[in-house]
Amino acid sequence: MRTIGWVALLLTAASCTPQLPSGEWGTLRYFGNLLGEPPMRLLPPLTDRQGNVHVLYGAPDRADTQVFVGRRSGGWTGGCSAHRGVGGVHGFVGRSDERTWYWSGTALVEVDGRTGACSQILRDDPVSGTELLFLGVAPFIDETPSRRFAYALVQGATGAPQFLMVDLDSALPFNSTPLEAEDRGSVEVIGTGAWTALRITVFVVRRDGETVVLFVDRFGDIQRQLVVDLPNDVGAYGIQGMMQFSDGGIGAGLIGGDRVLVVSVNEARVRDVGFEAQGLLRFSGRLFVTGEDGDGLAIAEVGADGTLGATQPFRSARIATNGLDGEIAVNDERGDPARPRSWTDPVSAIGSRPLVSPYPIDSYTLWSAGWLVAGPNFDSGVEPVTAVAFAPVGVELP
């Protein structure tokens, strides 16, 4: 087995924090009671570079969106909220020093890790005043010494859809390129991704009945365009979570069942994994598909040629699942001072098992990933209300 080599976000913390063994849980930080029951309407948490934990609550088919921020020194902010348009949360876009960004409905939203406040970015065109709809946002923050940029496919009330480079510091459009004149008003976004090693963003769109994968450079120019034959049941935003890419440029996106869309600059095709594909996991520049195979948890690497490697047991996820059995110590950080509590038989708050999600899973230290755990719940009369905690969990992969 090989221990993960994710780039550490918290170099200082990592240098003094002992390595969590595979599947072992760190301290559970209880931060709130949320509507719903496991699996919750939650995405894998994201940690900014100052060590603040950002938790995104919501679902693609719901407009109720909240973000909770856990300060590195302890304590949490109440859930801030920002959303616009039809649909719900698409996912985190990325992070910087003390900020994260997420895409919800047709809005691009910034979260301040210091205050826990949410604010929409570039809601209107600064020249025309036209409302800008973010049809697709790539999960990539491009940083230079002086600026931070996000990449999106946007459309105003008039005009064709356009690729837009968004200056996140000034909240202004930096560079725009119309998609194509003939595509005016006829573009349906299926999913987005990013090949971060080369700063290439990827948009899967359907236009005039044809589905294409577009590789777009940082200036909005389409560098490669591939036609892909997707099943008819894969509609708007039909790629679950976000597409993820290895450093070598092999990407994957889940489209249901055992089907995975695998793309490179030379080919895009649907492949059968051989088990129920429920998640993606990227580390050390490599990419894996995760899910359930019979009664067990499975993992398979997406190879450099786009084929799936041998299915293997996902040991860390299995150990993490078993580690939640019985009575678990929890640090209740909903007030000051924090208080020790215990939960009996908690479960993964995200999906069916720990470390399995179609959304990017963030590293917490060199040897662990951040995850969310669901504890006791009660009936509010509308739907159950469930206690939720954040915790790191040790990861080891083939």
Image (spheres, helix red, strand yellow):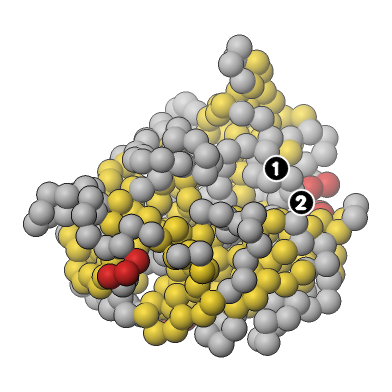
Is residue 341 among what the camera can see? no
Residue 227 appears in the rendering: yes
Few, some or many C-alpha atoms within 10 Å of disc 2 (few <14, some 14-19, many ≥20)?
Answer: many
Work out whether 179 lies above or below 306: above
Q: Which mark is residue 392?
A: none
In the rendered view of the protein, which quadrant contains the N terminus?
bottom right
Q: Which residue is mark 1?
A: 348
Relative image position of residue 286 (x, y in whole percent): 63, 77
Report the residue at 21% width, 71% height from top. 175
- Identify the residue at image location x=37%, y=55%: 135
Could you tell me which residue is drawn at 72 percent across and 72 percent down?
271
Q: Residues within 10 Å of mark 1 (few under 14, many from 20)?
A: many
- Judge from the rendering whether residue 51 lies leftward or rightward of residue 120; answer left or right: right
Task: Count the labels in the image.
Answer: 2
Q: Is 74 on the left-hand or right-hand side of 342? A: left
Image location (x, y in percent) of residue 142: 34, 71
- Residue 320 has which mark? 2
Furthest-right residue in this view: 295
Q: Secondary structure at mark 2?
A: helix
- 1 and 2 marks in contact (CB < 8 Å): yes
Q: Is residue 76 above or below residue 197?
A: above
Residue extending furthest toward the left: 127
Q: Amino acid at mark 2?
A: Ala
Q: Amino acid at mark 1?
A: Ser
Left or right of 190 on screen, residue 395:
right
Question: Which marked residue is nearer to the observer: mark 1 or mark 2?
Answer: 1
Q: Nearer the viewer, residue 387 or 327?
A: 387
